[in-house]
Image (cartoon, grey):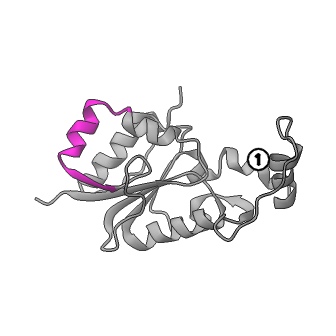
Amino acid sequence: MPKIKIATNWLDVCAGCHMSLLDMDEHLVELLGKVELTSSPITDLKHPPEEGVDVGILTGAVSDTHQRRDARLMRDRCKILVALGDCAAINGIPSMRNDFSSDEVLRRAYIESESTVNGKIPKSREIARLLDQSLPIHQVVKVDVNLPGCPPSAMSIYYVLKELLEGRIPSPSGEYLKYD
């Protein structure tokens, strides 16, 4: 039986969800026997392969033009898209900036912060443009599975991946939505 191909990426996020993924411990070893991790922010390969993957996992909100591009790329290249964590599923912490204009956010970060001396807002074609609002992934692309949590527990992530490996679309509830 061929391995299920999985790609992950993080957008506007703290990396806690990927740390929770790694916290599966022995369950991670079990899953690695059945899946092929094609790309991830914790590997050298950052984008899903052109030929596509079975499962795409995105963590974080969509807050800039590069993240929007990456969310669309993942959606185009995966059969099932999982929004992992509060930032991805409901916009979480990144939504705190939505009460301010992009100009205000950039000015505070690069010019007005207490540690900034002679700051200026960087401008370059290579730098992503901040969107007017931070968005949960489902407001940018179609999401098949949402697993909220900040971060979701390792066992909740294991449940979702195990269900997908069994050919079922998971619907996390009960203990899988419990936060400690």
Circle 1 sits on which residue?
Answer: 96
Q: Is residue 175 visible?
A: yes
Q: Label 1 neighbourhood size at 10 Å, few (<14), some (14-19), many (20+)?
A: few
Instruction: Tell which residue pokes out farthest to the top in this image.
Output: 180
Residue 128: percent from the left, percent from the top?
66, 64
Please say if 33 is above or below 53.
Answer: above
Residue 20: percent from the left, percent from the top?
44, 36
Instruction: Tell which residue pokes out farthest to the front in this image.
Output: 118
Q: Which residues are magenta?
A: 23-38
Q: Which secondary structure, mark 1?
A: helix
Q: Is residue 99 visible?
A: no
Picture residue at 42% right of the left edge, 63% below the top:
47
Viewer-closest of 72 and 179: 72
Seen in the image, is 65 located left or right of residue 99? left
Q: For residue 18, what is the image quadrant?
A: top left
- Asked whether 120 falls inside the magenta stretch, the response is no
Seen in the image, is 87 located left or right of residue 47? right
Q: Quadrant of the N terminus?
A: bottom left
Instruction: Tell which residue pokes out farthest to the left in this image.
Output: 1
Picture residue at 53% right of the left edge, 25% below the top:
180
Picture residue at 47% right of the left edge, 70% below the top:
73
Viewer-closest of 38 and 146: 38
Picture residue at 86% right of the left edge, 53% below the top:
107
Picture mark count? 1
Q: Amino acid at mark 1?
A: Met
Seen in the image, is 143 located left or right of residue 129? left
Please say if 168 is above or below 74.
Answer: above
Residue 148: percent from the left, percent from the top?
53, 45
Residue 76: percent from the left, percent from the top?
43, 74
Q: For residue 3, what is the image quadrant?
A: bottom left
